[in-house]
Image: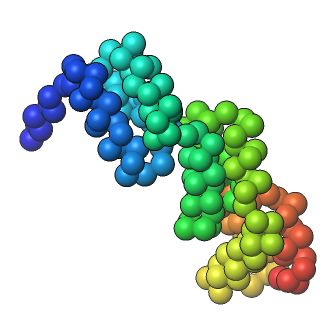
Amino acid sequence: MDQPKPNKITDEKVGLAKAENYCAYQERSQQEVRDKLYEWGLYPNQVEHIITRLIESNFLNEARFAVAYATGKFRQKGWGKIKIKQGLKLKRVSEPLIKKALNSIDGDEYLKTLGSIIEKKLPLIKEKEPYKRRYKLQQYAMSRGYEGDLVSDVLKDNEL
């Protein structure tokens, strides 16, 4: 069934108010807000003006978004730095902000999370041969976005 198309916004003030609510609900990247404004039917000059106003009133802050995204994905989903970096690049966050966000993740907590992810996966692997078992663990951890050399070190330390 076709859903009716929502009414397009043509007034910049209404767009700004809606965008403020959109940003207040959750941290957003500039690109997410820009895409949403275009989806609502605003014109390019209106979109850029609204984004400028959102930045000035601190509803939109790319650095704050990057840190919130990185810590959230790490703590909630257990993602590694590689996967987080890819996610931030998809949101079109700049490279210096990505580095800052990744540095906000605590190194000890990062290693502890990697160890617990490997420990949780270990009983689920049915492979008997130690080399294949280790390889599967390594591939799993790397698919979660963890660095290969770090995964190898953790596997060696745990003697798995």
In which quadrant is the N terminus drawn? Answer: top left
- Residue 149: x percent and y percent? 87, 60
Q: Is residue 40 left or right of residue 110?
A: left
Where residue 46 appears, as percent x and y from the top left, is 36, 17
- Residue at 48% x, 48% y is 27
Image coordinates of residue 40 in percent, x first then y, are 27, 28
User: Can residue 53 be seen by looking at this rendering?
Assistant: yes
Number of numbered discs overlaid on the protein picture: 0
* Quadrant of the rendered image containing residue 42: top left
**Residue ranking furthest to the front:** 57
Image coords of residue 157 (percent x, y): 90, 80
Q: Is residue 126 visible?
A: no
Left or right: 8, with 102 as reference point: left
Splitting the image into 4 quarters, where does residue 156 fall?
A: bottom right
- Where is the C terminus found, in terms of image quarters? bottom right
Q: Residue at x 50, y 31 (%)?
A: 56
Q: How is the image coloured?
A: rainbow
- Note whether 29 is above or below 147 in the view shown: above
